[in-house]
Image (tube, rainbow, N blue to C red):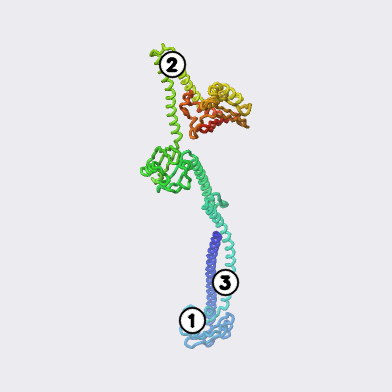
């Protein structure tokens, strides 16, 4: 609509200008024609005056004029001839062809100041169409004046014809100019209109808009420039969108929490990890002041230090309030743009809780290994020193001490063997000796091996469930798993109890459950029983000869078989270990 209005205004302005030019040209041409025609008439009349003067000079005197001859000249020339003798008044008047009231006044005016013979013809206009011409003459030695009056009757008709011709000519020219002007304006405004529409679409964000390039002139160059601009914008926006998507994906999926704070202290950007760390929603954080979000004083002080010093800061903080005791390493850095423009700061929160746990586990492991090794070595050394000091001669003491030394040596050997087994299972690239095996037959073998230990506590081992079930696994490692589980069940059960081993054969997996009626454990202890050297009942497990590494080994063997291990237990009601193993490795 706007472009059509522009085209209309442009065409109207062009036509108005052309109309004004044509009208002015018509008036000018009309006046030129009029001037030319009037001058031609005056020239003709002056020649006729010379003709009449020539005829007058042939007359003998003013009183002897050839009246008939002058009457005939008046009729032939279609003019009114008046002849006056100086000092005597009018001597001849044809009284025809020009009948006007101003005739006598005009003659008297001319006679009052008659032109001399030497003067040229003098014109006396009465109206635009009526003119008088006077010429001094000499007849028979007497001076006089010849006055000829005429009316240009055809002047109006000539004017009318001139204007008709000019009007027709100018009308046709105007029509042609309108058609050509309309075509030219359409031809030049259409590319501009198309370019304008594309520019509007580009302003709206539609960078796929294009205009036609069907000309090689300036409008074609404009269309080409618009299309080049659109393509560049589209490529730039596409690249920016890709980069923004990559950056957004990186920020959202990085394992560390990220938060950006502007120079006024308002939070302008957070990622998912940060929200998970602090257990807040994005609505609770975005566009809020950081001092209202960080309740921990250590984090606030770190942010303030970055704001004050404009330097990078790295610190470790321990957050415990409603955050399950997380250990975080916080990295803060200022955001400084071009020209040292200060934009704010960015804080990155690295969760090092697991690293702290691993570090603590390493410390505990070293301490536990040292403690476990120190106890039998101390016993062996003490009894050996006693024997060397003279107890060798006491046969009963010698046997007792040697039995204790052997027991402690076996215990030390078992500890070292378990450590070697655990280290071997945890090594990257550990391979199993896979084979097809009947898990029920394996459990029968284990039950037979553990029967002697169970009988010592007057306990019974029962195999329940299916009679046979084949899986793909490492026979010796799985045997080690169930020996450990059944041995623990016997150790932590009261005498006279029962150990129930149930086998459930599924479509793709086999579930083996080892259940006892023993002392059980508290719920908070269950996640820790697979840690190295962790004991629920430390006194009983140490007296039983356990190393505290058995369940850690069990857990790793089950995991390398791509199985799952779970525990259910209640204090004084018993414990149930469930091992789920896939049939195909």
Determine which quarter of the picture holds residue 568. Answer: top right
Disc number lying in front (1 or 3): 3
Disc 2 crowd rating (10 Å Cα; few below 14, some 14-19, many 20+) is many
Callout 1–callout 3 Cβ contact below 8 Å:
no
Q: Which mark is residue 136?
A: 1
Q: Nearer the viewer, residue 436 or 230?
A: 436
Secondary structure under the numbered disc 3 in the rendered image: helix
Residue 440 vs residue 337: left or right? right
* Residue 262 image offset from top left, x and y in percent: 42, 47
Q: What is the total number of numbered labels drawn onto the structure image?
A: 3
Which one is earlier in the sequence, the residue at label 3 or at label 2?
3
Tell me: residue 249, above or below residue 366: below
Q: Nearer the viewer, residue 272 or 295?
A: 295
Which one is earlier in the sequence, the residue at label 1 or at label 3?
1
How far apart in space, not on screen, are marks 3 and 2 (Cα)? 151 Å
Q: Nearer the viewer, residue 423 or 366?
A: 366
Q: Which mark is residue 401?
A: 2
Residue 447 vs residue 344: left or right? right
Residue farthest to the top, as pictured = 393
* Residue 154 image offset from top left, x and y in percent: 58, 77
Disc 1 crowd rating (10 Å Cα; few below 14, some 14-19, many 20+) is many
Callout 3–callout 2 Cβ contact below 8 Å:
no
How far apart in space, not on screen, are marks 1 and 2 (Cα)? 182 Å
How far apart in space, not on screen, are marks 1 and 3 (Cα)? 39 Å
- In the rendered image, which residue does mark 3 sit on? 163
The quarter of the picture where the N terminus appears is bottom right
């Amino acid at each position: 609509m706007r472009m059509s209005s522009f085209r209309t205004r442009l065409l109207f302005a062009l036509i108005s200008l052309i109309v004004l030019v044509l009208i002015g040209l018509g008036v000018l041409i009309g006046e030129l024609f009029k001037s030319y025609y009037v001058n031609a008439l005056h020239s003709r009349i002056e020649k006729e005056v010379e003709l009449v003067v020539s005829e007058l000079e042939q007359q003998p005197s003013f009183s002897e004029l050839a009246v008939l001859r002058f009457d005939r000249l008046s009729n032939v020339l279609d003019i009114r001839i008046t002849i006056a003798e100086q000092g005597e008044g009018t001597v001849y008047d044809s009284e025809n062809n020009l009948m006007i009231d101003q005739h006598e006044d005009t003659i008297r005016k001319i006679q009052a100041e008659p032109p001399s013979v030497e003067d040229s013809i003098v014109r006396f206009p009465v109206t635009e169409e009526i003119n008088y011409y006077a010429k001094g003459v000499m007849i028979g030695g007497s001076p006089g004046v010849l006055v000829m009056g005429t009316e240009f009757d055809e002047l109006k008709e000539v004017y009318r014809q001139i204007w008709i011709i000019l009007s027709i000519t100018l009308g046709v020219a105007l029509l042609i100019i309108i058609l050509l002007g309309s075509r030219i304006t359409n031809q030049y405004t259409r590319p501009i209109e198309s370019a304008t529409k594309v520019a509007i679409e580009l302003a709206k964000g539609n960078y796929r808009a294009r205009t036609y390039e069907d000309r090689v002139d300036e409008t074609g160059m404009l269309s080409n420039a618009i299309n080049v601009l659109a393509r560049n914008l589209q490529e730039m926006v596409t690249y920016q969108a890709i980069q923004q998507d990559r950056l957004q994906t990186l920020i959202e999926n990085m394992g560390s929490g990220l938060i950006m704070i502007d120079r006024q202290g308002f939070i302008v950007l957070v990622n998912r990890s940060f929200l998970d760390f602090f257990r807040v929603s994005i609505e609770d954080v975005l566009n809020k002041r950081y001092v209202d979000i960080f309740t921990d004083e250590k984090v606030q002080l770190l942010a303030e230090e970055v704001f004050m010093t404009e330097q990078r800061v790295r610190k470790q903080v321990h957050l415990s309030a409603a955050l399950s005791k997380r250990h975080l390493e916080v990295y803060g850095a200022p955001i400084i743009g071009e020209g040292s423009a200060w934009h704010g700061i960015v804080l990155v929160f690295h969760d090092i809780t697991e690293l702290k746990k691993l570090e603590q586990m390493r410390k505990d492991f070293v301490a536990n290994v040292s403690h476990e090794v120190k106890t039998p070595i101390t016993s062996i050394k003490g009894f050996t020193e006693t024997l060397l000091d003279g107890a060798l001669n006491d046969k009963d003491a010698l046997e007792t001490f040697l039995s204790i030394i052997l027991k402690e040596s076996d215990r030390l050997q078992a500890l070292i063997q378990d450590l070697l087994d655990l280290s071997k299972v945890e090594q990257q690239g550990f391979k199993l000796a896979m084979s097809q095996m009947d898990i029920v037959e394996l459990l029968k073998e284990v039950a037979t091996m553990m029967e002697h230990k169970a009988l010592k506590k007057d306990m019974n081992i029962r195999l329940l469930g299916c009679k046979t079930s084949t899986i793909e696994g490492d026979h010796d490692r799985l045997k080690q798993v169930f020996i450990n589980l059944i041995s623990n069940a016997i150790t932590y059960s009261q005498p006279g109890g029962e150990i129930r081993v149930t086998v459930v054969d599924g479509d793709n997996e086999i579930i083996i459950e080892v259940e006892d009626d023993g002392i059980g454990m508290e719920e908070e202890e269950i996640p820790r029983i697979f840690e190295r050297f962790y004991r629920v009942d430390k006194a009983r497990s140490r007296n039983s000869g356990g190393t505290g590494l058995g369940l850690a080994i069990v857990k790793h063997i089950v995991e390398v078989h791509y199985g799952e291990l779970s525990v259910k237990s209640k204090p004084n009601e018993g414990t149930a270990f469930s091992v789920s193993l896939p049939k195909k490795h």
